[in-house]
Amino acid sequence: MAKKKPLTKVRVKTVAAASLDDAKGQIPKGLRAMDELKPERKAGGDRAKQQLRLLLASGAKKIRLAAHFFANLEQRLASSASGVTYKQLGFDGWKSFAEHVKKKIIAMATDTRDLAEFKKGMKGRKWWFIGSILFEPYVKHGPVRGFLDETARAALKVINDAVKADGHYAMVDLWNRPIKVTEGFGTPLAGLEFVLETATGKKAFLDFGHIAFTGSGHYVLPTPTEIKLPWAAGRVAGQFSEFLPRLKDAERLLVGFKKSDLKKLKKRVGSGVVRILEGKEGDELVWAEMDLKKLVFDPRGLNQMVVKPSRKEWGEVKRPKGTPDLNIDIGTTAKGGGSFYWKIEVCVNRTPFEKIYEAILLGKN
């Protein structure tokens, strides 16, 4: 009789794995897919695997994997969010915000099928997600929004006061041709997303900006605004220097507004607005094509702004204030020259945003 080998830890693991494989072989093929729906134990690596499979899937399989990946997302968001509310992100509840981020993640693309390579890109994707999906809406809809509205009104007041005093204000169009504005600009609307249609396709253009019209249809962007995390803000000077050239090369300028502005936009069709784009059910914004020939600028300055977290406060682990402090500075688009732009630093830290990210992508509560 052969002597039995002792059950070392290695052997126990081998025997258990073999037994599991044998058991799996007895499972009917149609039921094996249920194995994909088993919850993973580790939030980090296993969630990366789930996400990669989700992004690579299509059709019914994508729907099924998404249902598992986002299970209980609304509850996870409600329990993990602290210091940032759904209202500050532009939503009426965690449920609607959860539906929003589901669409964003499902629409993400990946150029790799290799899990190890996909994991290497997790850090970059994390900060892209926090910047684009969390911090940017926080600036557009949260406590910073009041400051953005106020600065736009202040810039418009300079123009409107000059029109009232002198009967006109000298502005220029996109091609630097003089335009004599003889009537004031009205109450500005907030453009929440800006897209350029070019010969090579649609391209994101500007993160945020108010738009105000005159009665004759001329319109101005009093304070074009970029919203960046600290590491990305270093490249904003180049973006600002390309602001006018990119507009000149564009075939169309499309702007997304909140749906409640639709009635006001319809009144501008043929007078600053070319057309209202036909939307579909579930769209979060109403989109309008703007008439580039009616866009005018103040020749004394574009009043461009970049809004970013303060490096010091962003790194601190604490809850942000209900209304964060703002630091204001001036930058230039080129060393030793170029045009000026405003640097607005928001004194808010990253921890609340990271917790929301972890609830969504890592499955943490």
Image (cartoon, helix red, strand yellow):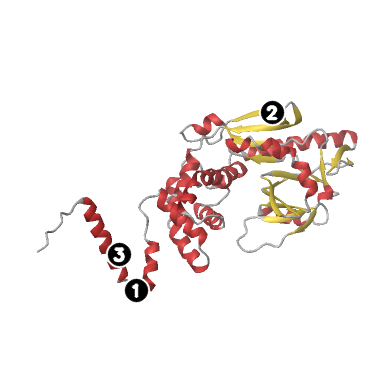
Question: Is 277 situated above or below 92?
Answer: below
Disc sitting over residue 28 in the figure = 1
According to the picture, the residue beneath numbered tag 3 turns out to be 21
**Residue flagged by tag 1: what amino acid is it?**
Pro
**Residue flagged by tag 3: what amino acid is it?**
Asp
Q: x%, y% of residue 323?
A: 56, 35
Q: x%, y% of residue 240?
A: 72, 38
Gap between marks 2 and 1, in whole Å? 67 Å
Image position of 268 (left or right of 120): right
According to the picture, the residue beneath numbered tag 2 turns out to be 330
One can see residue 120 in this view? yes
Q: Report the residue that reaches farthest toward the top.
A: 336
Quarter holding residue 220:
top right
**Residue flagged by tag 2: what amino acid is it?**
Ile
Q: Nearer the viewer, residue 168 or 277?
A: 277
Gap between marks 3 and 1, in whole Å? 13 Å
Q: Nearer the viewer, residue 50 or 361?
A: 50
- N-terminal of the pair, mark 3 or mark 2, is 3
| Pair 3/1: label in front | 3
